[in-house]
Image (spheres, coloured by chain):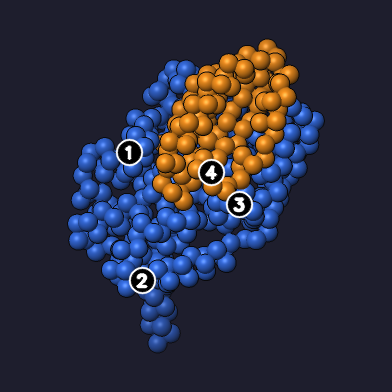
Chain colours: A blue, B orange
Amino acid sequence: MNRVTALISLIVCVFILSACKKKPDIAYIKKVNEIDSIYRMADNPELAITEYQKLYKEYYPKNQENRDEYETYITLAEGKNIDFGGKKSLYKLIDLIAPYGNRYKKYLPLFKKYGIDSTEVKKEMADWKKGLNKTLIDSFTVAMMRDQEGRYDDTILMAKNVKKNAALLMWTFEKYGFPSIEKMGTTGNNDVFFAMPTFLTHMIESKEHYPYIKKKLLEYVKSGDCLPRDYAIMVDRENINNNKPSEYGYTLMIDIQDSAQINRNRKSIGLPSLKHSAKIVRDYKDK
Amino acid sequence: MSGIVWQTELHNFKFNDMKKLTGMKSNFSSFENKKMKNLQSIKGGSASSRSAPSGYRNSDGTTTVDADVYSDNTPGVWTYKTRFVVGQATSSLEPG
């Protein structure tokens, strides 16, 4: 009897574990790049939908800036009358677009079709906001203002501020992990904008802490917490400052000498190829 | 509308400021200092583009100035648009 119970327990555990979805990490991001390429470059939306369906069986959705993968999936599937998960998936979508102000308005007809009215959407967004980390919002509101204080003309103040911001960032890593949009949104108190690529780039100026910050950020890229783009922009700025060639293609076009190597580097951290990225940018401009 | 405003801002930055900043040493004019110290640049309000500048001293004593531009061409969707650079490196690449 005990053996039977143990076997059933084991089967149940295996079933539960296999049904558990994973947090989006670098493997997820690389897969999204592949699917995005199927849709955007190979112009095969049907295959892209199938691949997204498989992906979202395995992972919780994410909606990266400029990629908008979950929005793309739902929009494509809805357009072709393919089941994308209906109301349940739309609630996930609301949480993912909640940081972006009025973006939800674009989807109101779709929400309405599935029985979610605008009041419910706003309530869901308000609930999302309540779940943000107030300590991080307060801290990074101050940090972003401090980051810009004295820029260009007061090098002593700049150095002091970079030191404080580096300390804050490392404290955040220890206590909360990477300060992502999911944790603190896109804007802080008094509508201060969290200009994260700029902020991270300035960490280069902290000779003492930059090596550690860079190492941690790469870990956060791999865990899916930090956008690969933000990491790449920072590293390539470091390359510019040291008269080194670009690693990821963000040190401006004049430095791109070996695009094949750059594409390999980009792929390793979850960035699309230069050609694919150029298409994404063009598509975004056309929107 | 927002796209037009952003283009205008970039145009102004490029053609008015490039002349003044390219290859300059760190002694910026008071006008530029005032402009660059403007903390409103990373605040919102009705602006449809936001920028957050940086400044780096080059080994030859000149200064490279970056301005990261964020825009909401789709209203409410703030995205990183480009890093605009004036100084040693004078080109920019929009991120994908």
The secondary structure type at the circle numbered 1 is helix
- Whether A230 is drawn above or below A252: the answer is below
Q: Are marks 4 and 2 in contact (CB under 8 Å)?
A: no
Report the front residue among B4 and A15: B4
A287 left or right of B3 in image = left
Q: Determine the secondary structure under disc 4.
A: loop
Report whether residue B89 is seen: yes
| Rendered-image quadrant of the C terminus of chain A | top left
Q: Which residue is mark 2?
A: A116
Residue at which label 3 appears: A191
- Give the amino acid type for the residue marked by disc 4 in the picture: Ala
Q: Which residue is mark 1?
A: A286
The subunit carrying tag 4 is: B
Whole-number angstrom distance, CA of label 4 to CA of label 2 = 31 Å
Disc 3 is placed on an element classified as helix
Q: Nearer the viewer, mark 4 or mark 1?
A: 4
